[in-house]
Image (tube, rainbow, N blue to C red):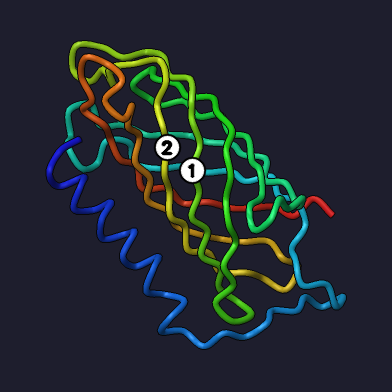
Amino acid sequence: MTRSALKLLIGLLVAFAVMPLVLPAAPVWAQDGKKDDPAFLSFGAGYYDFNRRKETGAEFRVEYRSDKKFAIFKPFAAASYTSTQQGFVGAGVLIDLFLGRRFVMTPSFAPHYYWGGNSKLDLGHALEFRSQLELAYRFDNRARLGVAISHYSNASIGNTNPGTETVTLYYSLPLQ
């Protein structure tokens, strides 16, 4: 992991930890009286490897975000492909943190199967871990429009661990 990526990750973790302390805690109730949102089909397009710039390109992503909860976590499954011919398929957990009625912060974590590295950028192992922080605007119909920053890393289980980051614009379509 690069020094700048580590700083970015630490900054995101600090922001995630401090945010609940500085924002007022207010329950979020949808129009039909339910507190939780439905499942989503999320579509994302982003700027891949924007930080290190070894192999920049576009990343296109689709995710199924479940409405089922296990304690505070919701499961999700994802697949993405980059314009640099690298791909990821994975599943993990997320947490929806409602910041008032309109904004939702969603940290997530998921192991991914990775393929397609090349001489410019090879992430070093078939198993990559993706951590992400998304901030989204929530519409009346519960659809969301958000921006996220994510980091792929193999946690040094490979011979190399260059890691990479993506900034992504998401549209999340409610399924109920």
Residue 1 position (above or below residue 74): above
Front residue (pair 100, 137): 100
Residue under the image location 41 percent in, 32 percent down = 129
Residue under the image location 28 percent in, 16 percent down = 158
Q: Residue 128 vs residue 57: left or right? A: right
Residue under the image location 36 percent in, 48 percent down = 167
Q: Residue 44 vs residue 119: left or right? A: right
Residue 59 position (above or below residue 98): above
Q: Quadrant of residue 123?
A: top left
SS label for mark 1: strand
Q: Position of residue 91 (x, y in %)?
A: 59, 33
Q: Residue 20 vs residue 119: left or right? A: right
Q: Position of residue 55 (x, y in %)?
A: 23, 26
Is there a contact, CB below 8 Å, between mark 1 and mark 2?
yes
Query: Which residue in the rendered view is the most extreme toward the front?
Result: 71
From the image, tell me which residue sits under label 1: 109
Q: Quadrant of residue 52?
A: top left
Mark 2 packing: few (<14 Cα in 10 Å), some, or many (20+)?
Answer: many
Mark sitting on residue 133:
none
Residue under the image location 26 percent in, 12 percent down = 118
Front residue (pair 106, 50): 106
Q: Quadrant of the N terminus?
A: top left
Q: Quadrant of the C terminus?
A: bottom right
**Residue type for callout 2:** Arg
Mark 1 packing: few (<14 Cα in 10 Å), some, or many (20+)?
Answer: many
Q: Position of residue 3 (x, y in %)?
A: 12, 44
From the image, tell me which residue sits under label 2: 130
- Structural distance between the alpha carbons of marks 1 and 2: 6 Å
Q: Residue 148 vs residue 89: left or right? A: left
**Residue type for callout 1:** Phe
Precedes in sequence: disc 1 or disc 2: 1
